[in-house]
Amino acid sequence: MKGVWEFMKKYSKVIIFVSLVLVLFFVLVVSFAPIFGSKGAVSRIYDKDDDYYYYLEIFNSVYNTIKSSYVDEDKTSAKTLFQGAIKGMLESLGDPHTAFLTEDDFKELTVETSGKFGGLGIHISSKDGYIYVVSPIEGTPAYREGIKPGDYIIYIEDQSTKGMPVDKAVKLLRGTPGTKVKITIRRGDQIFDKVLTREIINIPTVKWGFISEGNENVAYIKITQFSGTTFDSFVNAVKEIDKSDKQVKGVIIDLRYNPGGLLDEVLRILDVIIPKGLLLETRGRIEGASSKTYASGNKPIIPLDVPMVVIINEGSASASEIMAGVLQDTHRAVVIGKKSFGKGSVQTVRQLPDGSGFRLTIARYYLPSGRTPDKVGITPDIEVKTFDLSEEVQANILKVEKEGYIREYMKGKESLSNEDVDKLDKILRDKGIVLDKRIIRTLALREIPGIPLYDPEDEFIIKAKEILENYDKYRKEFVAYN
C-alpha cells in the first residue's frame, strides 16, 4: 500500500494529465459519435435525426453557400431564401391543410367574403400534387357547369396547378363578378376545359320542406354548409315543421356536397339533437388543442322516437362528416349514401413579423366512438348505388354540356316534367347521344332557376323514404358516450 501511495505521489501530475485526457476523449465521443455514424451505446442514446443544432449548422452552411455563390444574386435575398425554407418545412409534412402564406395570401385570408369578390362556388383542396375538387356548392356557377367532387383542376387560365398552394389557386379563381375564368379539368382519363363566370356567392345554408305522398309526410332538411347562421336556420326549420298541421313520420337530413364550415355551428346543432353524452373530442400536442365537447342535456328539438335518415356522399367533408358520424355513432340516425371525403383535422393560422404566415394542423377530431374521419371518411350504414358513369357516358355528358342541347331546351322553363325528360331523350338520341333518363333529368334540373328543393326521382331520396317506411328494421337503441 505504501508503495502505491509513493507511486501516485511521484507521478501525480502524469495521472492528472491522463485523467483529463480520458475525460476529454469521452466528451468528444459523446459529441461526435453521432456525426461519424457510431453504432455504439452513445449513438443509441443520441438521436441525430432530431439534433436541432446539427442541422441548423448544415442549413447555415447551405444558406451561406447560396448567398455567396448562386449565379443570380438578385434571387438570393434573405427574405426569398428564408420564406422558401419555411415553405419547404411545411410542405415536407405532406399535409394539404398545412401551408405557407405569403403576405398577399395572408391578407386574402382575412378579407371578409360577403359581397367583396366573385367566386365559382367551389371548395378545393390539394391531392396528388394538383388542385382537387372537394365539392361544388349547389346553385353556383361550378355546380351549374357540372364540376364534380373528385375532379382535378390541372390548369387555371393556362397556368399549371402542379405543386400550387391551395391559397394561390383560390386567389386565381376569384375575381370581379361577371368576369370569366377558364379551368382545365381532369376527370379520370378525360381532360377538358370549362369557362365559368364569377358571381357573388350568397347561398342559404338551410333549405327545408315536405316530401308528401297521400297522408304521409317526411320532413326534408338540406344543409349546404355550416356558416354563422346555420344553427339559427336549422332551429327555425324544425320549428316551422313542428308548427305545420302535417303528420310527420320521419326526418331526412341531406348533407350531400356539404364541404363543412364552422365547427361551433355543427356542435350547436348536434346539441339540440343529441340529449346527452360526448359529442366530439379533439386531440393535439399543444396546450389547448385537446378538448371534449358534451351535450348540454337539453330536451332534443327532434324527439328521439322520430325516425331520422342522414344522406352523405363524396362531397360531404369536415363539419358535415362530424354531424353524420356523431348521429351514426349514437344510433340517432341511419346514415346512407356514399363514403364521405375524409377531413377531420384542426388548423391554426399564425402571422409572422414580416406579414407572411402559415396554416398548421394542430389536432384531429374524434367521434364519440373514438374513431376519426380524417383521411378515411364516414362509411354509410347503407350504400346507395347509382348509375355507373363509364368513360363513354362521361364523354356523352361532356358533349351535351359543351353543345348546350339541354340548356337550349330548358330556356325559360321553371319546372321539369317526365314529358320534358322524354322529349330531351329523343332530342339527344336524334343526335346519336344515348344517356340514362336519370342523367338527363339531373342535367336538366341544373338549368332551372332556383333549383327545386329535391328531385322525386333522386335515388338517395327514394332510398331514404324506403328506410323511413321500414324504420323498425333499422332502428337501434340510442347510445350515449362518456
Image (cartoon, rainbow, N blue to C red):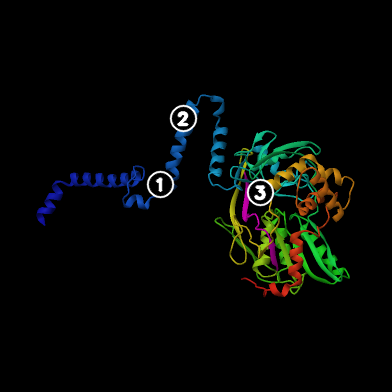
Q: Position of residue 178 (x, y in %)?
A: 81, 38
Q: Nearer the viewer, residue 455 or 342?
A: 455
- Mark 2 and mark 1 in contact? Answer it, CB < 8 Å: no
Amino acid type of the residue tagged 2 in the rendering: Thr
Q: Position of residue 40 (x, y in %)?
A: 31, 50
On the rendered structure, is 396 left or right of 241?
left
Residue 31 vs 258, above or below: the answer is above
Mark positioned earlier in the residue sequence (2 or 1): 1
Crowd band around label 3 with a 10 angstrom C-alpha radius: few (<14), some (14–19), many (20+): some
Q: Nearer the viewer, residue 30 or 418?
A: 418
Amino acid type of the residue tagged 3 in the rendering: Gly
Crowd band around label 2 with a 10 angstrom C-alpha radius: few (<14), some (14–19), many (20+): few
Magenta highlight range? 333-351
- Whether 336 is among the magenta residues is yes
Say which quadrant the C terminus sits in: bottom right
Please give the residue where the numbered disc 3 appears in the rendered image.
150
Tell me where residue 344 sits by quadrant: bottom right
Disc 3 is placed on an element classified as: loop
Disc 1 is placed on an element classified as: helix
Tell me where residue 115 sits by quadrant: top right
On the rendered structure, is 127 left or right of 37?
right
- Whether 268 is among the magenta residues is no
What residue is drawn where x is 42% and y is 42%?
54
What residue is drawn where x is 56% and y is 43%?
91
Please give the residue where the numbered disc 2 appears in the rendered image.
65
Residue 428 vs 75, above or below: the answer is below
Q: Position of residue 108 (x, y in %)?
A: 70, 41
What residue is drawn where x is 56% and y is 44%?
90
